[in-house]
Amino acid sequence: MKKLIIFPGGREGRLLNRIIKNNMIQTPYDRDEVVFFCDNNMISGSYIEGVEVIHPDELAAYDKNEFIILVNNNALVDVLCKQLYSLNVEIAVHMIPDYVFHMRWNPNSGLPFSISVNITKPRLPYLEVQITTECNLKCKGCIAMCNVNNAQTMKLELFEKNLRRLKELFWGIKYLKIFGGEPLLHEEINRFAKVARLYFPDSELVIHSNGLAIHKMDEDFFDMIHDCDIQLLFTQYPPTGKIKRRIENKLRMKDIRFLFTEPVYEFRRSINMKGSLDSDDVYRNCSKCINLINGTLSCGIGYVINDLEEFYNVKIYEDKFENSVDIHHTSLDGWQINNFLNRASNLCSYCSFMNYLHTDEKNFYQWSSSGKAEFSDWVEV
């Protein structure tokens, strides 16, 4: 029987301690196993609910074969792993996923109560996966190019192949978003979401939608969203805003987590044709959205440029994929991939998508979902 160390000792740590000790749900752990709380910000030798507190620096003194660290905070698991790695501490680390604290877990859920963390690998901080370019809005200036490209859908087998490879490179993915197009139009959306949760139970798993197809989804979809603890994120375009209350009422009845963006009344042109922006400046104000496209990890802006060049027969920038990593044909490990992606590149100087510091009103236009697509919908004038 392993002895348990709960990290950190805050609200969720106290809750986890009570879950285990009071048998609030059937966990894999025994009620008498919790022997320490571990916390960077509490006094070593103090007590929480009768359990002694130790500092991470003290962990090296404990037998790696005797203890397991249970991390109860998604945001802090990476902090602890870096500490353990730097201290050369080999105690096993298991993370308690958010869905346990969201009351989505039970022994029959098919989801693990705790996840084994391989501290010799990093975690990918963010990932977006586009599973379809089919859309029911086709916004003018769509950053996913859904209004000009023929609709394509990803096969589940390819999705799983990519996630399997990512699992070899990273122990987890902190934030994992499934989007489109409109992902709710993919006929296998349920299976995609289940596979994503199976491979990365640590993730804050999100499906990003415009919400217009919610009323067409069957009960199996809503049950899956609830049981897999997936958050629905809705971009609040004008048609979405009109049915927002209906969506909210539906999802509250189903006990499903959801979030709406602020209303979107305008788009901005996303490409600086001249590449005249300061790449470091752009990157500092970037949301760092890593995309998985065609088996590569990269910023998606290179693919926008590529599609514009092909569709309008123009030349914008030669090395569009300079910041891409082919996950199936790379000698880089996960640490090196994170370092490679976490930097500005010359491609950034062509990106106006997040360019808040150089706002020019002429590069904004009113949102619409109709009309002929023009090159100037994407390119700064």
Image (spheres, helix red, strand yellow):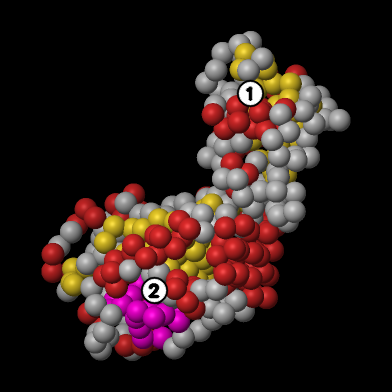
Magenta segment includes 145: yes
> Taken as a whole, is the magenta stretch helix, strand or loop?
loop
Kind of residue at disc 1: Cys
Q: Which mark is residue 249?
A: none
- Quadrant of the rendering where the N terminus is positioned: top right
Q: Looking at the image, which is closer to me, 210 or 124?
A: 210
Q: Residue 187 placed where, x, y %?
A: 57, 80
Distance between the alpha carbons at the discs numbered 1 and 2: 46 Å
> Residue beneath label 1, please?
38
Q: Residue at x 39, y 60 (%)?
A: 248
Magenta segment includes 159: no
Determine the image quadrant of residue 376.
Answer: bottom left
Kind of residue at disc 2: Leu
Q: Is residue 222 visible?
A: yes
Left or right of 314? Residue 209 is right
Mark 1 nearby-residue class (10 Å; few <14, some 14–19, many ≥20): many
> Residue beneath label 2, please?
212
Magenta region: which residues?
Answer: 132-149
- Quadrant of the rendering where the C terminus is positioned: bottom left
Q: Residue at x 66, y 28 (%)?
A: 18
Q: Secondary structure at mark 1?
A: strand
Q: Is residue 296 visible?
A: no
Left or right of 315? Residue 106 is right
Q: Residue at x 60, y 31 (%)?
A: 15
Outermost residue to the right: 1
Q: Residue 241 placed where, x, y %?
A: 29, 66
Q: Earlier in the sequence, mark 1 or mark 2?
A: 1
Q: Secondary structure at mark 2?
A: loop
145 vs 20: above or below: below
